[in-house]
Image (cartoon, rainbow, N blue to C red):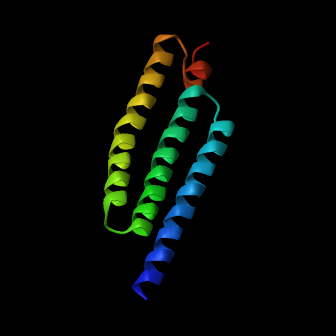
Amino acid sequence: MIGLIADIASWLLIVVGALACVISGYGMLRMPDLYTRIHAASVADTGGMLLILVGLMIQAGIGLTTAKLVLIVVFLLITSPTATHALARAARQDGVRPASEKRTRR
């Protein structure tokens, strides 16, 4: 019975995480400028990745595989926001302005 509940919970997390990643891809297509695209990609992909990996941890149970998945989560939670920030900062220094700023300045 507990195994069935764990399977349902893990697959639910994996499916919701995959949906978050798909929504992130759609957001990257629909957003008007670089900064909102970066935001859509980073937030949804980080959340989607976290949900998928937690679902995989439940599937794996307690053990070495779960420890490796925890290390992957920690690594991705540090590097993904850092890379997003670096990309946005480089774009800003290169002169790329947000869409809202383009509309207000004439």
Viewer-nearest residue: 50 or 38: 50
Could you say where residue 1 lies in the image, as x and y percent from the top left? 43, 89
Query: Where, by quadrant of the figure, is residue 80 drawn?
Result: top left
Q: Residue at x 45, y 62 (%)?
A: 56
Q: Nearer the viewer, residue 35 or 24?
A: 24
Name the residue: 57% across, 15% down: 105
Q: Position of residue 43 (x, y in %)?
A: 48, 44
Q: Residue at x 52, y 69 (%)?
A: 12
> x and y percent of residue 82 in the render?
38, 31
Residue 16's image quarter?
bottom right
Instruction: Tell which of 105 and 50 is nearer to you.
Output: 50
Which image quarter holds the C terminus?
A: top right
Above or below for 47 versus 55: above
The x, y position of residue 6, in whole percent, is 43, 76
Q: Where is 71 relative to 93, above or below?
A: below
Residue furthest to the front: 64
Is 70 situated left or right of 29 in this image? left
**Label total for image:** 0
- Residue 61 vertical position relative to residue 33 in the rendered view, above or below: below
56 to the left or right of 33 = left
Vertical order, 93 against 63 (above or below): above
